[in-house]
Amino acid sequence: MNAVDTVSTTWNTPAASNLPAGGTTLLLTATATDSEGAVGADFAYANLVGQPLTSSGFWFLETTSPAALQHLANGSSEVVMDEGPFESASSMVHLDGQATMLVGGQQLNAWTLPTASNGATLLWTIQPPLTPQTGGIRFVRRPSTSVSGPAIAEVGWADRVQWVNDDGLILANWLLDEDETLVDASIFGGAMVVLARTAANELRLISHDLDTGARLQSITWSPEASGSLGPNGKAWLISILGDPAGLESDGTFRRWFTEMDGNTGLASGNCPGSADVSNAGRLEDGRSWFSREGTWLVEETVPLQMAHPKPIQATAEDRANGITWVLESPAPGEAQTWMALDAQGWLPIGLPNLDVSGNLSGVGSSGSVAHNRPGPL
């Protein structure tokens, strides 16, 4: 007598959005062993197809009042404007793979992308947390490309950093203490590292577990640069030799290092240039930049080099086409300008420069590139 059993099974494969473009062949093997130890096997093939990474152009937000959202489509020289209303706008990000733009100001708003026949429509709003810390949203951007997965935005409030998805669901929280106010944050070595200012006007680097949000350790110092003193002093979070570093306005950095035995400390150094630092930031691939007389790229294995002859205020990255858009700081009385550069060498690539009209006071602008899916590939 023959007995036949039917066995059902499931397995997980990488999301197609995280695969290289093209096909990946899988060999599926099923084995069965009967009560006498005899083994049988069968085989089948399956194919996973990665979705090529593409982009549909560059969006930028004029943070004048009322703010205006503008779009330069790939291959076009014509900028299309949507005047909103995008009130209290300071930063924005296009969620990869979604027709959604998140705009941060005093609150976080999600908007549909405008079309030829309809303007942007408000989808949902997240109000600021009720905390002793005050002020609007510090930033809205994509997390580092070291983090793969669904399209999410990294949002910096006065007292916390959050990851928020397209539906407004808060996926992760990294909280500060009541005497700390957020300056900036980024991922280093699998941890969320926050640069904060304390109630005593010290600067503090704090690491949090990326998955649980638990606070791990911190290190504190008193800034010495005159432009970094007081509650309104300027400071930035950058990467030096792969470690988190607080940057003060005179170009002094404080690198938070960890020895092999686990001991930690601060190593001070000076960035090139003589003028005060006007702005600094970190690219999605982990490289940092800072602006003094010009703009310098900071890479782990390459000596510091001036990558752009003018100071910049912001960046936006087109990973699909290897482009980094930079927002040049204007001379007095001039409009700010977005310029397209090669992502690696930061050389101009011939796309039209985009003037941010109305921003003669230098109040800022924010840009983002619309990708069809997450992932660096």
Image: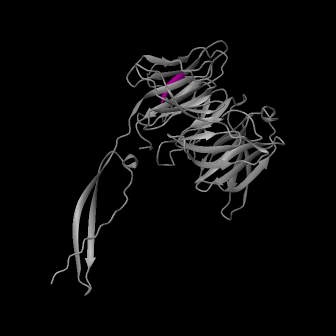
State the image quarter where residue 6 is shown. Answer: bottom left
Instruction: Tell me how many marks there are.
Output: 0
Q: Is 339 part of what is drawn in magenta?
A: yes
Residue closest to the far left? 1
Extreme residue toward the top, this view:
333
The N terminus: image quadrant: bottom left
The residue at 25%/82% (across/down) is 34
Quadrant for the C terminus, please: top left
- Of 332 and 34, nearer the camera is 34
Q: Nearer the viewer, residue 368 or 150?
A: 150
Using the rendered image of the protein, determine whether residue 8 is visible from the camera's viewpoint: yes
Between residue 78 and residue 115, name the one nearer to us: 115
- Principal SS element in the magenta part? strand
Q: Which residue appears at 19% of the width and 79% of the height?
A: 3
Q: Is 1 situated above or below 305?
A: below
Q: Quadrant of residue 355?
A: top right
Find the residue positioned furthest to the right.
200
Q: Is residue 205 left or right of residue 89?
A: right
| Residue 61 image offset from top left, x and y in percent | 55, 24
Residue 234, how many percent across, how many down?
Answer: 74, 33
Q: Is residue 330 above or below residue 186?
A: above
> In the image, is residue 261 part of the stretch drawn in magenta?
no
Name the spot of residue 311 as percent of width and height, x first.
62, 26
Question: What residue range appears in magenta?
Answer: 338-342
